[in-house]
Image: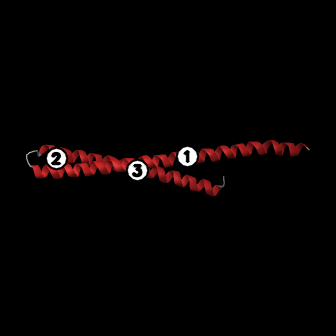
């Protein structure tokens, strides 16, 4: 594998790592906001209007948190794919170098 491809692969892996960390943090924030909205709804059980609003906001935050968690999982799959490409290219490069080594030693002997 050429140097340019290795650089692109490394940058892609680093980018996926950064995105995955951000997605996890955002998902946690959304789920905490959903829990806070649900707690607010539980406190104000007597006011039905506020109960409906807090429940709606809580469910919206919860849905956003789950969507971000799904995106983080998708980023994880992309990271695994890029890592497998890197490992495959390294093993191919090692096989090629192992095969070229005996040929060069045979040429030196003749």
> Going by the image, does 63 lie left or right of 4?
left
The C terminus, quarter of image: top right
Q: Where's residue 20, x and y in %?
A: 43, 49
| Residue linked to disc 2 | 40
Identify the mark at residue 98; answer none if there is no mark. Answer: none
Colour scheme in the image? secondary structure
Residue closest to the eye, 4 or 41: 41
Residue at image mark 1: 83
Q: Find out whether the residues at labels 1 and 2 contact each other: C-beta distance under 8 Å.
A: no
Q: Nearer the viewer, mark 3 or mark 2?
A: 3
Ranked by sequence position, the earlier of labels 1 and 3 is 3
Is residue 44 rendered to the left or right of residue 63? left
Mark closest to the chain's N terminus, 3 or 2: 2
Please give the count of numbered marks on the rendered protein: 3
Element marked by disc 2: helix
Label 3 sits on a secondary structure element that is helix
Picture residue at 48% right of the left edge, 51% below the top: 16
Q: Which residue is mark 3?
A: 71
- Where residue 85 appears, as percent x and y from the top left, is 59, 48
| Within-10-Å neighbours for mark 3: few <14, some 14–19, many 20+ | some
Q: How far is disc 1 from disc 3 in space, using C-alphas?
A: 18 Å
């Amino acid at each position: 594998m050429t140097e340019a491809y290795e650089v692109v692969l490394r940058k892609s892996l680093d980018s996926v790592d950064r995105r995955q960390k951000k997605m996890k943090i955002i998902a946690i924030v959304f789920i905490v906001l959903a829990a806070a909205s649900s707690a607010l709804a539980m406190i104000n059980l007597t006011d039905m209007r506020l109960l409906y609003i807090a429940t709606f906001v809580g469910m919206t935050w919860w849905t956003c948190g789950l969507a971000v968690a799904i995106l983080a999982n998708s980023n994880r799959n992309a990271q695994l794919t890029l890592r497998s490409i890197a490992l495959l290219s390294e093993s191919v490069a090692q096989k090629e170098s192992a095969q070229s080594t005996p040929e060069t030693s045979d040429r030196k002997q003749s």
